[in-house]
Amino acid sequence: MARLTVERWAQLAILATGLAAIRTAAEILRLHAVRGPAFGMGTALDFARGAVIASAGTWLAAAAHFLGRHRAAIAIAAATVAALLGYRFLVMG
C-alpha cells in the first residue's frame, strides 16, 4: 500500500470537517422532526453555532490547501475538530 502524502492527509482532513458541518446542520432538521413543537430556538441556535464553527474551519482549511499550505490545512482541521468537541462538551453539556 502506498503511503499517504501530506496533500492527501490535508484533503482527508478537509473532508472530515466538511462532513462535520453537514452532520451538524442535519442534526437540526432531525431534532426538529423528532421533537416537533418542543424543539426550541435555543436548541437550534446551539447546533447552528456548531455548524458555523465547522463551516468556517472547513473554509479556512480549504483555503490553506489551495494556497499550498497542506500542513496548515491539517492543523486548521484538527483545531476545528477540537473546537467542535470543546463546544459540544463545554457549552452544550
Image (tube, rainbow, N blue to C red):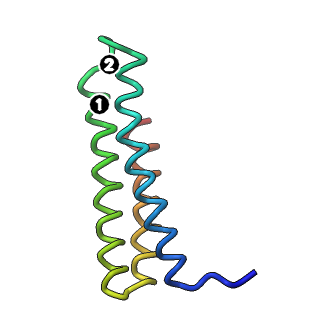
With 65 as the anchor, is 45 left or right in this view? left
Q: Position of residue 70 (x, y in %)?
A: 43, 83
Q: Position of residue 30 (x, y in %)?
A: 41, 27
Above or below, 63 relative to 88:
below
Residue at 30% x, 70% y: name it: 60
43 displayed left or right of 7 = left
Q: Is residue 45 above or below residue 64?
A: above
Query: Which residue sits furthest top?
Result: 37
Dot 1 alpha-carbon crowd within 10 angstroms: few under 14, some 14 to 19, many 20 or more: some
Q: Which residue is denoted by mark 1 in the rendering?
A: 44
- Label 2: which secondary element: loop
Q: Measuring 54% from the left and 76% from the top, which residue is drawn there?
A: 9
Quick one: label 2, few (<14), some, or many (20+) residues within 10 Å? some
Residue 55, above or below 38: below
Identify which residue, 36 or 50, lies in the foreground.
36
Q: Which mark is residue 59?
A: none
Which of marks 2 and 1 precedes in the sequence? 2
Q: Which amino acid does the dot numbered 1 rest on?
A: Ala
Q: Quadrant of the C terminus?
A: top left
> Does the residue at mark 1 contact the one at mark 2 (Cβ under 8 Å)?
yes
State which quadrant residue 38 falls in: top left
- Residue 54, above or below 33: below
Residue that label 2 marks: 39
Residue 27 percent across, percent down from the top left: 41, 34
Locate residue 29, reporting x and y percent.
35, 29
Q: Residue at x 31, y 37 (%)?
A: 46
- Secondary structure beneath label 1: helix
Screen quadrant of the N terminus: bottom right
Report the number of numbered marks: 2
Q: Amino acid at mark 2?
A: Phe
Task: Give the CA separation, mark 1 to mark 2.
Answer: 8 Å
